[in-house]
Image (tube, helix red, strand yellow):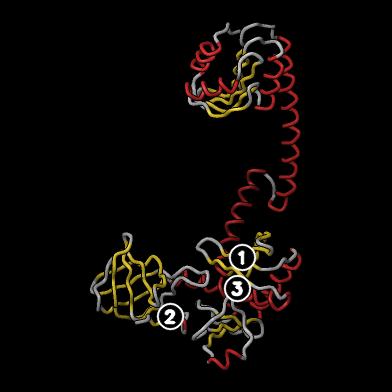
Amino acid sequence: MLTEKLFEKDSYLKEFTATVLACTEAGGEYAIVLDRTAFFCEGGGQYGDGGVLTADGITARVRETVPRQGEIAHLADAPLPVGAQVTGKIDFETRYRNMQNHSGEHVVCGLIHARYGFDNVGFHLGRDYVSLDINGVLTPEELAKIEEDANGVIYANVPITVSFPDEDALAAMEYRSKKELTGEVRIVTIEGYDRCACCAPHVARTGEIGLIKLLNPMHYKGGIRVFMQCGSSALRDYNERQSRIEAISHLLSAKQEDVVAAVERMKNELSEARQTASALRRALVEERLAALTETAGNTLFFETALDVGSLRLLVNGAVEKTGGAVCAFLGSDEAGYSYLMASRRYPMRTAAKAFREALGAKGGGSDEMIQGSVQATRASLCAWANDYFKEETV
């Protein structure tokens, strides 16, 4: 017996009664099948409803609702007896947010299709974000105009209706659909703006969508992917962004309207500081190399003020004065070390293998130079270098 889909005809039905047809354990939860349900089941890019089912004093919390061979399975945390009469209550706050977002998607995609002939070929209405995949490219200016006009449709507060046209009426009807459909087809119409085959609940009028905001467009599979927020989701997103702006404003000691200029100023200051630090590191390397005497043995460095680039300059310069190996370590016992080792005498690939086996180092390189990272103490690094290269260390 197929589950009767009450949500297809009444998107606002929050509570209903039904009979339990089946209840089976599945992965630590229970798949409860009813003869009828107001819980929307996963489909059309949208996840299924949650809520509660109550029967015989047992309350089963429904995490999600999914389709299974024509039936609808309510995935719950407790079993309900087969044949029991249940009362179902959906999480309508989440349902309504999804209705706003899904209806908003129809408005946006209807406008894009009418204006540019592009289709929505992918839709994801998730718990955290909504995305639309359009099979054509729109410029930022064109998307901004679509957003403006989509909100105009909201202000017009036009009706959104659901119908199940017969085969002849459907054949004569122009509507959007991602795939060829057979059998009974549910058509969602936004008067004057869109007509689309869709299985999901929608709001009754466009004014209920509240707001449409298009975000972060990106090129995707020859078209674009656009992220979107509508209604209460858009309000939540705006509040989160506002909180971040307030935090940035506080950290920068700048008015909110001045944060872009303040960040630009900080970026320039950081760039200048990096250039100064780079010059100081080069000067330090030159000073270290000038003070270095030639040796037939090895040279070890332990550094904290350099970076990997200046450490390489130090090693390259020290090789000219070192007959054995140059081993340079950047870091600390607590944080670990980055290392560079070079030699014109020892094959460094062989040294890298021995270093990995002895101290669990990571990295590699050529016979002339190796580099990587190691979590070890300064004492153990000195001991390994002294033992492996078997030369006097200076």
Q: Tell me which amino acid carries mark 1.
A: Met
| Real-space CA distance between mark 2 and mark 1, rounded to the nearest whole angstrom | 26 Å
Q: How far apart are marks 1 and 3 (CA)?
A: 9 Å
Residue 56: image location, x then y, percent: 23, 74
Which of the labelled discs sits on residue 228, or is there none?
1
Q: In which quarter of the image is residue 343?
A: top right
Q: Which residue is drawn at 43% across and 70% down?
A: 49
Q: Are marks 3 and 2 in contact (CB under 8 Å)?
A: no
The disc at residue 75 is none
Q: Where is residue 337 in the image (x, y as percent from the top left)?
A: 55, 25
Numbered-mark total:
3
Where residue 310 sits: x, y (%)?
Answer: 69, 24
The amino acid sitting under disc 2 is Leu
The answer to whether 368 is drawn above or below residue 111 in the figure is: above
Q: In this view, does 76 lie to the left or right of 317?
A: left
According to the picture, the residue beneath numbered tag 3 turns out to be: 104
Q: What element carries label 1?
A: strand
Give the mark nearer the N terminus: 2 vs 1: 2
| Residue located at (53% from left, 11% from top) | 386
For image coordinates 60% across by 14% down, the residue present is 300
Q: Which quadrant of the figure contains the C terminus?
A: top right
Q: Do the residues labelled 1 and 3 touch (CB within 8 Å)?
A: yes
- The amino acid marked with disc number 3 is Gly
* Callout 3: SS: helix
Query: Which residue carries the number 2 mark?
Result: 13
Depth check: give the residue in front, 224 or 147: 224
Q: Quadrant of the N terminus?
A: bottom left
Image coords of residue 227 (percent x, y): 62, 63
Q: What element does badge 2 sit on?
A: loop
